[in-house]
Amino acid sequence: MKSKINAFMKEVEERNGHEPEFMQAVQEVAETVIPYIVGQDIYHGKNILMRMVEPERAVTFRVAWVDDQGEIQVNRGYRIQMNSAIGPYKGGLRFHPTVNMSILKFLAFEQVFKNSLTTLPMGGGKGGSDFDPKGKSDSEIMRFCQSFMTELYRHIGPNTDVPAGDIGVGGREIGYLYGMYKRLKNEFTGVLTGKGMSWGGSLIRPEATGYGTVYFAENMLKTRDDSIKGKTVLISGSGNVAQYATEKATQLGAKVVTLSDSAGYIHDADGIDAEKLAFVMELKNVKRGRIKEYVKKYPSAKYVAGKTPWSEKCDVALPCATQNEVNGEDAKMLLSNGCFVVSEGANMPSDLDAVHEFLNAKILYAPGKASNAGGVATSGLEMSQNSLRMNWTREEVDSKLKEIMANIHAACIQYGNDGNGYIDYVKGANIAGFVKVADAMLAQGVV
Ligand code: NDP
Ligand code: 2IT
């Protein structure tokens, strides 16, 4: 089996060896899906996984814009349309200086499996730009978004490709992008998700990724007759996903003790309660400040510069910042401090060493493509509401979200149960996500 996986990876490397994050995401899938394919006659001779690692289409484009000083700036825009076997391409846009082909291809590849797991009809895509929103004025953000959409609009549409937010792209950016699309096409359609409530958005979409990550942790804990209530929780990041993971974990009776950004983390031994979270939301979403300001407001908390939260004691860790933020050493530290639940809010936050540490320790470990799927699932629900020209209530959307997270959990058990009571959620998510897309590709022939 190892030689089959190695032979496959060698061929992938010939074309993509210069894209480390993409190679990492493919490796993780190959390790679990190739052994499954070998046992299934219908996939033999179809080269299906090789077809899945090649994007159906990838566009890059110039994004020129004028800053507040009147200087002309140039960034690079991207959209990777990875797989449309089960629905229109769907996935976020990331604005961050580290954005490149490798990062976006890993995200688009993971998105294909994640979207399949949601049970909704969505293919996978991802896009964005190396534009850095930090320190930019509102007008600069607007001009950048308008320039970005002036090219992107040719490649997307409500039945073709439906982008949404990711790192650096939230409600404000989706608004500016939507306004420009509408102007260019003269059409009011559900071409983006994460829209505002008065112009086609869905209740619970802002909350969905963080809430879903906690719902998934609850589902995992239930398999051991346990719950998140009373647990000490480490959360990384302090953006959209981290904020709503904090809110839901706290509502369910857990104590969240950390948040972070790329400069360091805060630890509050008393827990980040609703009032403190409201401060963080104002700080991050309105003032666009840094997490270290938390300790000025709450001096009993500590700020640790230049470090991630993983050396702190916890029962549950929810990495909600970015890829490869948990390495093998971090994983060992978490395990030795008693952590036994990891539910990933971010995409691929654990590197391959960390994944293997968690799997070997047989803890409750959920990969992002399963545990953070609540965000895109609720985007799918936003698309449904747009098509129906109706809005569901908060309760309706939240109960559908809960049901979807429970279904994803059940799919992971179906394909990831080792027969001795241990559930390998990595294997479960990869195979369950793969089967639906692969079967659709088989039915549609070699295209
Ligand atoms: P935001 O932009 O709202 O927040 C990102 C947070 O992560 C910030 O606190 C940011 O800190 C931190 N961060 C970003 N890059 C780094 C880095 N290189 N090192 C350390 N910290 C970093 O993004 P989201 O909350 O939306 O996204 C967070 C993660 O969740 C990403 O992996 C994203 O792909 C994933 N995700 C998001 C979904 C969504 O619906 N938004 C859905 C599913 C997954 P700083 O301000 O210092 O950059
Ligand atoms: O990684 C993700 O799933 C997202 N950034 C959300 C994508 C979406 O289309 O809502």
Image (cartoon, rainbow, N blue to C red):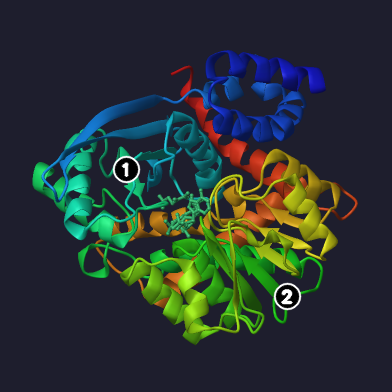
- Residue drawn 53% across and 55% down? 321
Q: Amino acid at mark 1?
A: Phe
- Residue drawn 77% across and 59% down? 334
- Residue drawn 62% across and 78% down? 268
In 3D space, how far apart are the residues under numbered discs 1 and 2 (Cα atoms)? 41 Å
| Mark 2 C-beta to ligand 1 under 8 Å | no
**Residue 383 in view (yes/no):** yes
User: Going by the image, does 273 lie left or right of 353?
Assistant: left
Q: Amino acid at mark 2?
A: Ser
In this rendering, is residue 80 above or below 300? above
Q: Secondary structure at mark 1?
A: loop
For marks 1 and 2, the one nearer the N-term is 1
**Residue 188 in view (yes/no):** no
Q: Secondary structure at mark 2?
A: loop
Residue position marked by numbered label 2 in the rendering: 227
Cβ atoms at labels 1 and 2 below 8 Å apart = no
Horizontal and vertical percent position of residue 56: 41, 25
In this rendering, is residue 57 above or below 120? above
Residue position marked by numbered label 1 in the rendering: 131
Q: Say which quarter of the image contains residue 378.
A: bottom left
User: Going by the image, does 336 lie left or right of 397?
Assistant: right
Which quarter of the rendered picture does the N terminus lie within?
top right
User: Going by the image, does 246 lie left or right of 365?
Assistant: left
Horizontal and vertical percent position of residue 54: 49, 22
In this rendering, is residue 132 above or below 372? above
Which quarter of the rendered picture does the C terminus lie within?
top left
- Residue drawn 57% across and 80% down? 272
Closer to viewer: mark 1 or mark 2: 1
Horizontal and vertical percent position of residue 380: 40, 54
